[in-house]
Image (cartoon, rainbow, N blue to C red):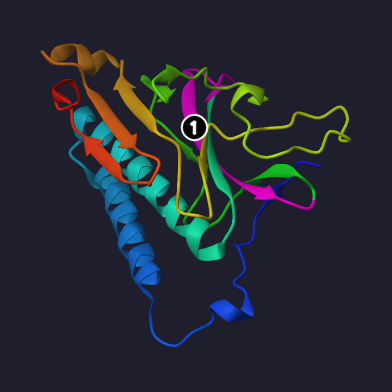
Amino acid sequence: MLQSITSPINKTPQQKQRGFSLIEILFVMLIIGMLMSVVVLSVGDGNRRQQVQGQARALYQALQLAVSEAVFYRRQLGVRFDLDTSDVPERWRYQFMLYDPELKLWQLIETEDLAEHELMPGLTLSLSINQEEVMLGDIEKQDRRLFELDQNVQQQALLEPDIYFLSSGETQNFVLQLIDNGVDAQNFSEPNIYTIKANFMAQFEFLLPGQAEDE
């Protein structure tokens, strides 16, 4: 049964070691970057463009962290994007998921470093994988499924990630755009669009408005 995991992913005895590994140091650097993005959103001067950039960078860093955790804990992780229509105005949100090989189910995870995030009103998301546009918000992603799901589970929504992060350190070749359609965005001559790119080897790029067109 689909459920949310509230406890951090446990380390195996073999992964306990003295000192700090390279991946652990990377974790700390990514978490610090995410905290800095939160500070920009919390104590900024109210400039929407800065706030949008802060949320885009926070998403970029969270995706990188998911790749690192997938490798470090040898688990299959994913991220899912949904439009929350239960409130006005509508907001996009993203949640991280963990694949359970025994239950053959994807489960939502809620840890300190990979928590659910809700974007500002007026922001929309666009995702393409292997140069094909993806319809976000689908319950079952059968056409892009990488792992078997438990077909014996009845009468429940089997959620699937939009992007996978594999224990091998690989991800999908994707382009994710965060687009600002807010009222303030109309005051700028160039669209306020932030682009996150990744290839199969989990090499990420973060492109500011105007840079995406040059690639």
Q: Residue at x 60, y 63 (%)?
A: 9
Residue 182 visible in the current orientation: yes
Q: Residues within 10 Å of mark 1 (few under 14, many from 20)?
A: some
> As drawn, is 86 to the left or to the right of 204?
right
Q: Is residue 97 magenta?
A: yes
Furthest toward the left, the residue is 189
Mark 1 highlights which residue?
93
**Up-down relation of residue 13 to residue 31 (above or below):** below
| 60 displayed left or right of 210 | right
Residue 59 x %, y %: 37, 41
State whether residue 47 appears in this view. no
Residue at image point 17% right, 20% down: 213
Residue 76 coordinates in the image, percent (x, y): 59, 50
Nearer to us in this view, 100 or 190: 100
Position of 168 compared to 107: left or right?
left
- Region of the chain picked out in magenta, as a range: 83-102
**Vertical position of residue 215 compared to residue 113: above or below:** above
Residue 26 picture quarter: bottom left
- What is the x, y in percent for residue 150? 81, 38
Tell me the amino acid under the disc marked 1.
Arg
Question: Height in image: 25 above or below 123?
Answer: below
Quarter placement of the C terminus: top left
- The residue under the point 31% across, 34% down is 196
In the image, what residue occupies the spot 64% across and 61% down? 7
